[in-house]
Image: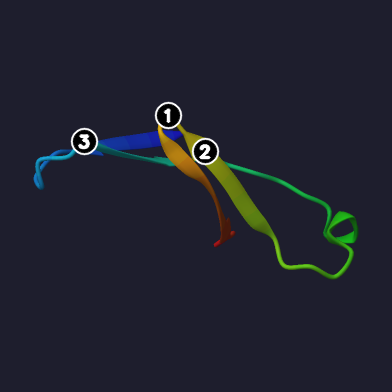
Amino acid sequence: MTAATSASDGLSTTTATLPAAYRTADLHGSAPSVRGTGWHTPERTVPAA
């Protein structure tokens, strides 16, 4: 995992790169995605890159 923190805009922002593995068959034809939540942050699902 790699992580970076930035506060240039006055807000604390943290990003992280997380390795992941999945079986294509487990997706049943859907595109892979990542779902995340945080403290006082709504749940968000984004396409896996």
User: In screen coordinates, is 33 left or right of 17?
Assistant: right
Q: Quadrant of residue 29?
A: bottom right
Q: Is the residue under label 1 in contact with that under label 3 (CB below 8 Å)? A: no
- The residue identified by callout 1 is 39
Q: Earlier in the sequence, mark 2 or mark 3?
A: 3
Residue depicted at 61% across the width and 51% down the height: 34
User: In screen coordinates, is 38 left or right of 33?
Assistant: left
Quick check: 21 above or below 27?
Answer: above
Quick one: SS at disc 2? strand
User: In screen coordinates, is 39 left or right of 7?
Assistant: right
How crowded pointer 3 is (Cα within 10 Å; few <14, some 14-19, many 20+) is rated as few
Please state the total of marks drawn on the protein image. 3
Q: CA distance from mark 2 to mark 1?
A: 7 Å
Percent coordinates x, y for residue 41 in the rendering: 43, 39
Q: What kind of residue is marked 1?
A: Trp
How crowded pointer 2 is (Cα within 10 Å; few <14, some 14-19, many 20+) is rated as few
Q: Earlier in the sequence, mark 3 or mark 1?
A: 3
Residue depicted at 40% across the width and 33% down the height: 40
Percent coordinates x, y for residue 49 in the rendering: 55, 62
- The residue identified by callout 3 is 12
Q: What kind of residue is marked 2?
A: Thr
Q: Which disc number belongs to residue 37?
A: 2
Colour scheme of the picture: rainbow
Residue depicted at 64% across the width and 44% down the height: 20
Quick one: SS at disc 3? loop
Q: Which disc number belongs to residue 14?
A: none
Q: Is the residue under label 1 in contact with that under label 2 (CB below 8 Å)? A: no
Q: What kind of residue is marked 3?
A: Ser
Residue depicted at 46% across the width and 33% down the height: 38
